[in-house]
Amino acid sequence: MTAQPAGPLVVVVGMHRSGTSAVTGALGALGLQMPRPRDRMPGGESNPEHWESLSLSLHDEGLLHALGGSWDAPPDRPRHWVHTAQVAGGFRSAGVLAAAYPEPVPSAVKDPRICLLLPHWRTVLAAPMVALLVWRAPLDVARSLLQRDGLPLASGLALWERYNRSALQGLVGADAYVTSYESVLAEPAASLTAWADWLGPLDGFDGYRSEWDADRAVAAIAPELRHQATTSDSGGRELLSAEQQDLLRRLEGLAGPHRPLPDLGLGEETPWATAVLAARREATRGAHQAEEDRRRFWALRERWGESRVELARAAADLRTARDERDGAHQERDGAHQERDGAHQERDGALESLAATRAALADAEDKLSQLYRSSSWRATKPLRAGLTKVEQWGRRSPGPGSGH
């Protein structure tokens, strides 16, 4: 069975660039469990420490991709999307969270994408879960996104509305504390004390209040963490749509704890914000398709290059095999020539032997005929006398010879 996070969990809910890292770091300094060090998202120039589980962020981004969007181009979630095949399998989500927060102690979980995925996570988490909703002035968020990611202000405002609207709708019925990032920076000690007092009596958190270090938590929130100057209460509101101004007023009016957070009956999203995010989705989809096509092109090019190398290697092997075959043919032809020469020599020797045998047979026949002739018998005394004369002539003269 897939592990469940032991909890209890404080889910820090908030839009990107809204101070969620600073708030989560303060909760960690207070005494809540942070993600395993090896699983923490690496920091950058704009944010030295995110206090965020890398595996959880990648998992949430994967869920958004499965629904047809991304963190900066949120998907239009279909009806009953929590139970669709794209995001079904909550055991895997629970396992990711359990691996990131292995100890059974109060933990602070943070990923801005959770704003968009709260209905899914609320079906997954069996442990007690409460939410600390942090929001920031919309123009501050938009300007920070422009500086960090190059997003136009209109896109930043549309994302601010979608994230915060989704967070308020997703937290209906949950124990939640709502605060602005500006108030945390202005009064960190009061904010930390209020959070601790709110968490202390909640189910699963009772008994830990005495172990928390409020002074260290306050020291973790530094004013220099602010990346953009705060927009004044009145400045810039005229740039917001009526729907965004209403959402901002609702957030301002929710400051403090809620058991549970009520249904605010939020209306529809700003039409132009919906259109902006739809255009970003389409552009992102086109960019992803172009990137996929580029990867495929280079993969095919690499495969083509490898095929050329393999073809050249095969041609070289073929030439070597042909050379070896031709050499073998030459050796075979030479052996055949040597064999033919040996056959010719053998045939000549046989012919010479046959001729010699024929001549010998003819001589023997002639000699036999001579022996049987009458002249041979008649001359026998003469031949005997000649033989004796030859013998006398071959003798050497003896001592006292007159010759």
Image (tube, rainbow, N blue to C red):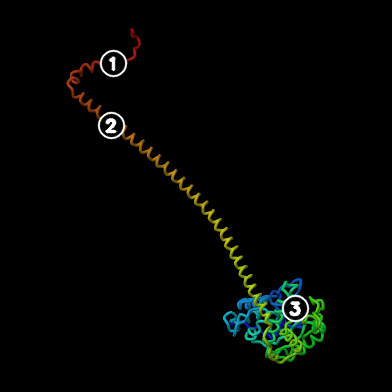
Residue drawn where x is 62% and y is 86% of the image: 123
Figure quadrant of residue 374? top left
* Neighbour tally class for label 1: few under 14, some 14-19, many 20 plus, Cα within 10 Å: few
Q: Amino acid at mark 3?
A: Val
Residue 377 x, y percent position in the rendering: 18, 20
Q: Which residue is mark 3?
A: 141
Element assignment for label 1: helix
Indicate which label's residue lies in the foreground, 3 or 2. 3
* Neighbour tally class for label 3: few under 14, some 14-19, many 20 plus, Cα within 10 Å: many
Q: Quadrant of the N terminus?
A: bottom right
Q: Which residue is mark 2?
A: 357
Indicate which label's residue lies in the foreground, 1 or 2. 2
Residue 225 x, y percent position in the rendering: 79, 77
Distance of label 1 from label 2 (alpha carbons): 33 Å
Q: Is residue 56 visible?
A: no
Q: Are marks 3 and 2 in contact (CB under 8 Å)?
A: no
Of residues 287 and 261, the one nearer the viewer is 287
Q: Residue furthest top?
A: 402
Figure quadrant of residue 333? top left
Q: Amino acid at mark 2?
A: Arg
Q: Amino acid at mark 1?
A: Glu
Figure quadrant of residue 379? top left
Q: Is residue 3 visible?
A: yes
* Neighbour tally class for label 2: few under 14, some 14-19, many 20 plus, Cα within 10 Å: few
Residue 390 got which mark?
1
Q: Which of the marked residues, 3 or 1, is nearer the chain's N terminus? A: 3
Residue drawn where x is 76% and y is 71% of the image: 45
